Amino acid sequence: ETGVTQTPRHLVMGMTNKKSLKCEQHLGHNAMYWYKQSAKKPLELMFVYNFKEQTENNSVPSRFSPECPNSSHLFLHLHTLQPEDSALYLCASSQISGGTDTQYFGPGTRLTVL
Amino acid sequence: GNSVTQMEGPVTLSEEAFLTINCTYTATGYPSLFWYVQYPGEGLQLLLKATKADDKGSNKGFEATYRKETTSFHLEKGSVQVSDSAVYFCALSRGTALIFGKGTTLSVSS
């Protein structure tokens, strides 16, 4: 595997379900990100992890719970979601080096909440 | 605050036409600027970037120049191809994260 991978690619869940999204980066980076992409809206940054520590949470509802067990893996745990949470969830990684850090994105998980 | 404004799409062009997608930004300090492209069913890919004023980023025939005086980073290509059909996102850096515009859909027909 190369780059940034995400699983599953598609997920349909009911509002009472619990599911998890997985992201893995094979680039040796030290920072990972979750973004939400909804129709007609800009990409929204959700969480930032730097060296496994969460450094940013953009007022994301608690029904989204991130986990970063190591610098290569990032999870997004989902529970009691709402239909408006249906979106494409994108994971990204970068190497934070004090300069301009290019982010590399995975293909995304298309989430539908019924 | 920091924000990015892109021209509304969709942009529809014939093959070999000239492309311009406008992007302006509002930022404190001196951010780096990026163009990302998203092909159908895929994630975002970095197309080009510029890190300081007057820098020109270029890749695959696309170019954009960081204009501090007009706070702009317009994307251009001299001759588009059908394979360039995608959604294009302008973005600026804020610390370790990126702030994106809403995206502009480009559709190129043969």
Image: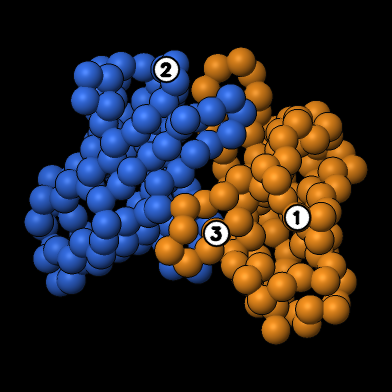
Chain colours: A orange, B blue
Residue B55 showing in the rendered view: yes
Residue B30: assigned label: 2
Which residue sits at x=11%, y=57%?
B16
Toward which corner of the image does residue A62 lie, by quadrant?
A: bottom right
Counting labels gives 3
In-front residue for pair A91/B8: B8
Residue indicated by mark 3: A37
Q: Which chain carries label 1?
A: A
Amino acid bearing label 1: Pro
Element assignment for label 1: loop
Work out whether mark 1 precedes mark 3 in sequence or the reverse, and give the earlier one: 3
Against A105, residue B39 (above or below) is below
Across and down, in percent, residue A51 comes to 80, 29
Q: Residue at x 71, y 73 (%)?
A: A82
Is residue A33 shown left or right of residue B69? right
**Which amino acid, by three-letter code, is at mark 2?**
Tyr
Structural distance between the alpha carbons of marks 2 and 1? 31 Å
Q: Position of residue A99 (x, y in %)?
A: 55, 17
Q: Which chain carries label 3?
A: A
Query: For this view, does A89 lie left or right of residue A19?
Result: left
In the picture, the disc for residue A61 is: 1
Q: Which is in the foreground here, disc 2 or disc 1?
A: 1
Q: Do the residues labelled 2 and 1 touch (CB within 8 Å)?
A: no
Taking the spot 53% from the left edge, 32% from the top edge, the residue there is A102
Image quadrant in which the C terminus of chain A is located: bottom right
Q: Where is residue B14 in the image (x, y as percent from the top left)?
A: 12, 65
Residue A101 drawn at (x, y percent): 56, 27
Q: Badge 3: few (under 14), some or many (20 or more) residues near its Cα, within 10 Å?
A: some
Comparing A11 with A43, the one in front is: A43
SS assignment at label 3: strand
Which circle, 1 or 3, is nearer the viewer? Answer: 1
